[in-house]
Amino acid sequence: MPKLCIRDLELKGKRVFLRVDFNVPFRNGQITDDTRIHAALPTIQYALEHGAAAIVLASHFGRPKGKPDPQFSLSPVCEHLETLLGRKVTFASDCIGKPAAQAVKRAQEEGHGIVLLENLRFHEGESANDPQFASELAALADVYVDDAFGVTHRAHASVAAITKFLQPAAAGLELVDELRYLGKALEAPDRPFVVIVGGSKVSDKLGVIENLLHRSDRVLIGGAMAYTFLKARNMPVGRSLVEWDWLEPARSIMRYADGVGIRFELPTDHVVTTKIEAGAPSEVLRIGDTAIDNRIGVDIGPATVKIYGALITDAKTVVWNGPMGVFEIDQFSCGTTGVARAVAAVKGMTIIGGGDSVAAVKKAGVADRITHISVGGGASLDFLGGRRLPGVEALTDKA
Ligand code: AMP
């Protein structure tokens, strides 16, 4: 855990550099999901209420390759933030140098005190964790707060090198929440502890499965990744997505689970189709049925939803990452929606991570019944997978 939280800082009259994650999905000039902006609001409000002279918001947005690129400007996010806060936000056309310093000064003079800096990744120094770039960012403020959990798995200048130049350095409210909930699941989960993993690839989530397997009581697998495990058990899988190089790791995980008596569940039925597109003919088959022929498995079936539901219902801790099928297409979304409802009904602590699982619980209309929705996809996978988070270490002695 970071040594300091924003609540430990004296903010009165101080300029606060607040690293946020405003890397929101954006299509046709519109923000399509503003969850990440909402996640930063409590920390912004906290700093305002505690008398900060200026709040300097900094974020990356997309992958602009280290130089300015108008399609990755944070300016539309600035407008949206003004609406959400009901308060003016000064936009700085660059995140360092004169434009940034002048914007901070202007926001203080005008009294609203909030600045959003242009995309950090318009400078190569951000991704390179360059000390010179970090020191220029640091010069804009008196204290540092990191509330961008989604970037803590990267050693980038605004989350890592900057704390060498700007102290005190503390975690924001969202970051503290993320570490508290995910940390509790890792270190002291109330039992039964059920882990649900879906999505496209075993290779992306093997670290999480391995790290959580021996801590959990039941692991439920869905999504395309189930087919690598099913193939490893010599089941017919048609043209379903199989990662051929991952059959042996998949076998070794299942052997381990068997050996220590952890329930490691694969689907017992599934929805198969000829084509992954809306309107394609589909049917439910039992796993193992050779009638799959050369079709593709795209969702867990109703029998599996029932079995998984029964294994979820008495859980005291649930961690879920990755959808159970191609949930973006309504016809193949029943498995994911069914699991979402089962998780929402759990009385214990429920944590959902990964952009797609979050979208899925929203689609199922149950997001407000989940204890904690993690906004950091890659970072939550790394944290749950037991990897170090440079952005968190930068807030501790390990920096
Ligand atoms: P991930 O980013 O690894 O969580 O994967 C999410 C993606 O996996 C979503 O876009 C789903 O459509 C996709 N997905 C889930 N199940 C399947 C499946 N059975 N076949 C193909 N894609 C799938």
Image: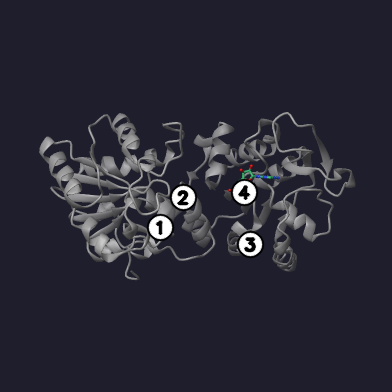
Mark 2 lies on residue:
376
Quadrant holding ligand 1? top right
Count neighbours of disc 4 (C-alpha within 10 A) and say few if under 14, some if 14 to 19, many if 20 or more: many
Q: Amino acid at mark 2?
A: Gly
The answer to whether the residue labelled 3 contacts the one labelled 1, judged by CB atoms less than 8 Å apart, is no
Number of the label disc, if any, that sits on residue 152: 1
| Residue 76, image x, y percentages | 34, 34
Q: Amino acid at mark 4?
A: Ala
Number of the label disc, if any, that sits on residue 213: 3
Marks 4, 3: nearer the viewer: 3
- The answer to which of marks 2 and 3 sits earlier in the sequence is 3
- The answer to which of marks 4 and 2 sits earlier in the sequence is 4
Q: CA distance from mark 2 to mark 3?
A: 21 Å
Residue situated furthest right in the rendering: 290
Marks 4, 1: nearer the viewer: 1
Marks 2, 3: nearer the viewer: 2
- The answer to which of marks 4 and 3 sits earlier in the sequence is 3
Query: What SS does tag 2 mark?
Result: loop
Query: What SS does tag 3 mark?
Result: helix
Q: CA distance from mark 2 to mark 1?
A: 9 Å
Query: As drawn, is 360 to the left or to the right of 335?
Result: left
Query: As drawn, is 202 to the left or to the right of 90?
Result: right
Q: Amino acid at mark 3?
A: Leu
Q: CA distance from mark 4 to mark 2?
A: 24 Å
Mark 4 lies on residue:
315
